[in-house]
Image: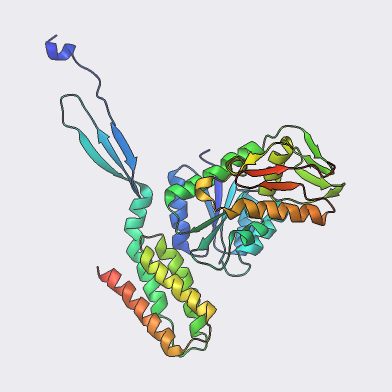
């Protein structure tokens, strides 16, 4: 048995482990080898990553489908903004979700808002989501 | 703790998927419902350990479903609302909910809130076999019934547990943190108004049943019972 074998010790793992938003940073240490730093992606993060643009696309499609000429335009826009704002917020589009929520609240508080103003805000948020999609 | 069944009620499939993934990652089982009618059906057939209930699920809405469930069960109900929605904790609690989460919620916080409800439910499921009596208030910890001067007063699970804590040691002042722990919440994730709302609703229920106001707030500390016969 040589000197090296006599000094053998079991590997010592995980000197530091800390959670991040959707993952966990893990640092491992092994005697006489370089330490390793690993990023472990959790299933929630993987699912969010895989589906975020699908969810965004659904929001865009729902907003595009609204017809300005409809009598229920404002009500439907408020409902779509509310629902889609809630959904995309879970999929990392928090600032866009906030814009949608604000639009929804505004329409609920002011159901008789001028149609031009409603349409302008509708277009603005749609463009914002489209920009996000292009990125 | 893991493998407990959670019912997730939300009309948006992507939100249900997110919540399901969070919970399943932590070992929970999940059943889903997309509207109020389906929620009641699934609730009755699966008997979940916790219900996560979105407010805006069409008709019947989350409040109505919450009240309906509360007629049949003391299961912990956690309500989900959009940020900035014109509802507050008081409305959720009045409907019988035990907790309130604003969307979006991180997986960690979601799991913590559910785990807290489950932990608390476990405590509530094995209470001491006693009846607590303070003045004309009688709390049966076994049947979880509350009586004021012989009149039965329905309480939500949270209200029951809040009152039980106070009635176990009527002269003692319990800190807000101690009460939050007992009702299955935590100071970190609860607003300052949460306990005030519960206390206020308890006072109203006791008063409406003909009892006196025995729940006192100790400014800057917490709550205690005080004797009306003193």
**Residue A126 appears left or right of B212:** left
Residue A132 location, x and y as percent?
Answer: 29, 69
Q: Count how many numbered circles sit on residues in the image.
A: 0
Residue A105: percent from left, percent from top: 50, 74
Residue appearing at x 39%, y 70% in the figure: A58
State the image coordinates of residue B81 (x, y, percent, origin top left).
Answer: 53, 62
Residue B141 vs B189, above or below: the answer is above
Q: Quick one: which residue is furthest to the left in this view?
A: A2
Describe residue A92's horizontal placement relative to residue B136 as left or right.
Answer: left
Q: B200 or A99, which is in the foreground? A: B200
Counting from the top left corner in percent of width and height, residue A60 is at 37, 74
Snapshot quadrant of residue A31: top left
Q: Can residue B157 be seen in this view?
A: no
Q: Which colour scheme is used?
A: rainbow
Which one is nearer the viewer's eye here, A115 or B214? B214
Horizontal placement of A112 versus B149: left or right? left
Judged from this view, the residue extending furthest toward the top is A1
Image quadrant assignment for residue B117: top right
Q: Can residue A96 be seen in this view?
A: yes
Nearer to the camera, B220 or B85: B220
Residue A98 in the figure: left or right of residue A41 = right
Location of the C terminus of chain B by quadrant is top right
């Amino acid at each position: 048995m040589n000197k090296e074998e006599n000094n053998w010790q079991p590997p010592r793992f995980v000197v530091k482990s800390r959670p991040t938003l959707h993952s966990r940073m893990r640092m491992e240490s092994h005697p006489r080898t370089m330490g390793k730093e690993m990023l472990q992606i959790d299933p929630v993060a993987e699912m969010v990553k895989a589906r975020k643009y699908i969810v965004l696309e659904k929001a865009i499609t729902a907003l595009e489908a609204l017809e300005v000429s409809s009598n229920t335009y404002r009500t439907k826009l408020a409902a779509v903004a509310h629902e889609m704002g809630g959904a995309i917020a879970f999929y990392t589009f928090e600032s866009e979700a906030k814009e949608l929520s604000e639009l929804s609240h505004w329409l609920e508080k002011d159901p008789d808002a001028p149609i031009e103003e409603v349409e302008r805000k509708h277009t603005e948020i749609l463009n914002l989501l489209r920009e996000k999609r292009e990125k | 703790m893991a493998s407990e069944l959670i019912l997730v009620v939300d009309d948006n499939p992507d939100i249900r998927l997110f919540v399901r993934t969070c919970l399943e990652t932590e070992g929970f089982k999940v059943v889903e419902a997309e509207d109020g009618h389906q929620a009641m059906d699934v609730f009755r057939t699966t008997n979940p350990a916790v219900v996560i209930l979105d407010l805006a699920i069409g008709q019947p809405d989350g409040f109505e479903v919450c009240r309906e469930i509360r007629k049949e069960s003391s299961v912990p109900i956690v309500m989900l609302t959009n940020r900035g929605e014109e509802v507050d904790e008081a409305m959720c609690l009045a409907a019988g909910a035990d907790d309130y989460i604003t969307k979006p919620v991180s997986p960690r916080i979601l799991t913590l809130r559910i785990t807290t409800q489950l932990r608390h439910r476990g405590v509530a499921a094995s209470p001491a076999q006693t009846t607590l009596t303070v003045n004309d208030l009688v709390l049966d910890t076994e049947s979880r019934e509350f009586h004021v001067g012989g009149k039965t007063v329905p309480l939500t699970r949270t209200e029951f547990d809040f009152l039980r804590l106070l009635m176990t040691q009527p002269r003692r002042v319990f800190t807000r943190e101690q009460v939050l722990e007992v009702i299955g919440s935590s100071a970190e994730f609860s607003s300052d108004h949460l306990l005030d709302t519960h206390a206020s609703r308890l006072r109203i229920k006791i008063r409406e049943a003909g009892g006196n106001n025995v729940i006192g707030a100790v400014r800057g500390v917490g709550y205690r019972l005080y004797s009306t016969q003193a």
